[in-house]
């Protein structure tokens, strides 16, 4: 019996923080700046999704969807409980979030959220996060969830907390990131 070849991986150690918002924010959020708009992508294609995911997550070891075959991504994008929302700035993509509605649990989960590298540091994050939160609450859910980890941008967790999310728990995970993905893994994250 032949053994399957084992794919080479880089072991990445992260602390994953799970957060929840149990009521919509009481105060209105900041508006998106002039030249910015958010749009739900009605029929997101796999290549466009990969562009968004890979570009936003390239600096932050976003690897799960990179490793997934196109058919798996297409199934996610075809799920009626999943929606993709893109932030445009002056007509060009500047960020995106993926929203998973979980009717059985009564929650909406912001599965992925982030800005493209050219949009980071320009004051868009807070307003875009609030737009994502408002979009999630508009689904009629009873709570909104999100998680972040120590591989994400250092302002991710403080921004979620400032937006009104409450920390539920933090877990240590070790990810087997396939070498073939070519991701740059910061030395501080190597297991």
Image: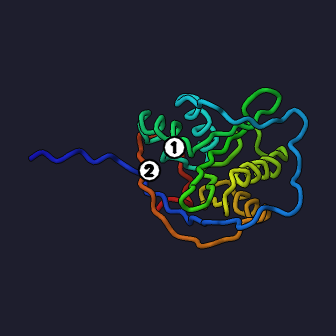
Q: Nearer the viewer, residue 136 or 19?
A: 136
Instruction: Please report the residue visible at 75 percent of the width from the left and 66 percent of the height from the top.
Output: 23
Q: CA distance from mark 2 to mark 1?
A: 8 Å
Which of the 4 image quarters holds residue 87? top right
Query: In the rendering, at what x and y percent does residue 73 appear?
Result: 48, 38
Query: In the rendering, at what x and y percent does residue 145 appear?
Result: 64, 61
**Circle 1 residues within 10 Å: few <14, some 14–19, many ≥20:** some
Label 2 sits on residue: 177
Label 1 sits on residue: 183
Q: Secondary structure at mark 1?
A: loop
Instruction: Please report the residue visible at 66 percent of the width from the left and 48 percent of the height from the top.
Output: 113
Query: In the rendering, at what x and y percent does residue 158 appear?
Result: 75, 63
Q: Secondary structure at mark 2?
A: strand
Q: Is residue 65 left or right of residue 124?
A: left
**Circle 2 residues within 10 Å: few <14, some 14–19, many ≥20:** many
Q: Nearer the viewer, residue 87 or 154?
A: 87
Dots 2, 1 in contact, CB < 8 A: yes
Instruction: Please report the residue visible at 60 percent of the width from the left and 44 percent of the height from the top.
Output: 57
Sequence-first tag of 2 and 1: 2
Q: Nearer the viewer, residue 183 or 160?
A: 160
């Amino acid at each position: 019996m032949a053994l399957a070849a084992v794919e080479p991986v880089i072991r990445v150690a992260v602390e994953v923080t799970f957060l929840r918002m149990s009521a919509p924010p009481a105060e209105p959020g900041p508006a998106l700046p002039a030249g910015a708009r958010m749009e739900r992508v009605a029929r997101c294609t796999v290549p466009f999704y990969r562009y968004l995911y890979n570009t936003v997550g390239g600096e932050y070891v976003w690897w799960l969807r990179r490793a997934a075959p196109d058919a798996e991504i297409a199934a996610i994008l075809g799920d009626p409980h999943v929606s993709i929302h893109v932030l445009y700035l002056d007509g060009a993509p500047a960020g995106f979030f993926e929203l998973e509605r979980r009717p059985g649990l009564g929650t909406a989960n912001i599965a992925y959220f982030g800005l493209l590298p050219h949009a980071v540091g320009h004051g868009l994050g807070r307003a875009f996060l609030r737009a994502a939160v408002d979009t999630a609450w508009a689904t009629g859910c009873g709570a909104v969830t999100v998680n972040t980890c120590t591989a994400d941008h250092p302002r991710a967790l403080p921004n979620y907390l400032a937006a009104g999310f409450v920390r539920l728990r933090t877990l240590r995970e070790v990810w087997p990131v396939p070498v073939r993905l070519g991701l740059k893994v910061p030395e501080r994250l190597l297991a």
